Amino acid sequence: MDKLRSMEIFVEVIDSGSFTAAAERFGLSPVMIGKHIRELEERLGARLLTRTTRRQSLTEIGRQYGERCRQILADIAAAETGAEAMRAAPRGLLKVSAPVTFGSQLLAPAVADYLAQHAEVSIELVLNDRVVDMVEEGIDAAVRIGDLDDSSLVARPLMPYRMQICASPDYLARAGVPQSPSDLMRHQCLDYLHWSRHLRWKLRRGDGEGGAAQADVPASRFRSNNGQALRMAALRGYGIVMQAEMLLDEDIATGRLQPLLQDYLPQPRAMHLLYPRDRRPTPKLTSFVDFMLARFGARPAVQPAVQPAVQPAAQPAA
């Protein structure tokens, strides 16, 4: 028999004073009530109730056990009430993982906006360029860049992760402007340590077929596992950097860095928001997922306007 059910029945027998009243409360027969009590007594190896033809009374063990049962049932009720409350409105701690560049440049400001909308939610933002084990590390939601392994996690597409190649005007004035990937052999290229060998300076081909090829670049004298460090080196005029567009776009807009090899930029990489499957996800996770998709969700490509097959002839000037 269900132990918790038997404990509930035992407490009701104590409160109502009889098997019959407890049977009416639970919609059971008095005989079934008696079976639940005997099951508890057999588990404990002690008598809980002293019964006569006219009355029943608690033994000393029964009195102590009844008090503990009452406390346990109250704790369970409080836990269920708390769980229901957490499902009613976004509240509690949300642990989120993201790559360093995306997390620091775009996600951190967005998290501040999300928290302003949900006063009872707290967020731990863990930035790391390695692939985290979400279950082992207790991560509620994670942003991943690149191809996904088969997984039981839900994956929602976000905007593509685009790369940019650039260098400072001072560096280009000294070293010249590369016109094709083959020119990189004569330049100082800043390397990112977390690139796997097949991703290192993988640029589009110039043959219009949309493929990609490994660009030959010399061994870099400056390598880092942090895109911000490589950006700072490029700003100081040390070499050519290839990093996330979101990290470099402000420098490009202000002229501190000059974009290069725009016809050869790497293909944008897929980016997803991952979270565990749950038939009844908590409001804090649901609201965060909705927020992320609204802020960073993949958007359909804009279709070019259809041009007329024949352009009207220009009218002569008056």
Image (tube, rainbow, N blue to C red):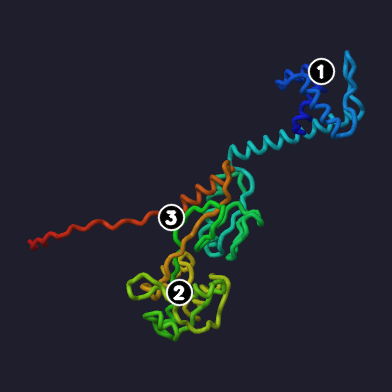
User: In the image shown, does 189 or 269 lie closer to the viewer?
Assistant: 269
Tell me which residue sits at (28%, 58%) in the image. 304
- Can see residue 230? yes
Quickly name the residue at label 1.
18
> Which residue is outermost to the top?
54
Q: At label 3, which amino acid type do we have?
A: Ala
Q: Is residue 277 above or below residue 49?
A: below
Callout 2: SS: strand
Mark 1 vs mark 3, CA separation in Å = 65 Å
Quickly name the residue at label 3.
298
Horizontal side of 295 relative to 89 (left or right) equals: left
Q: What is the x, y in percent for residue 255? A: 41, 72
Q: Do tag 1 and tag 3 residues touch (Cβ < 8 Å)?
A: no
Foreground mark, 1 or 2, reads: 1
Looking at the image, tell me whether mark 1 or mark 2 is earlier in sequence order: 1
Foreground mark, 1 or 3, reads: 1
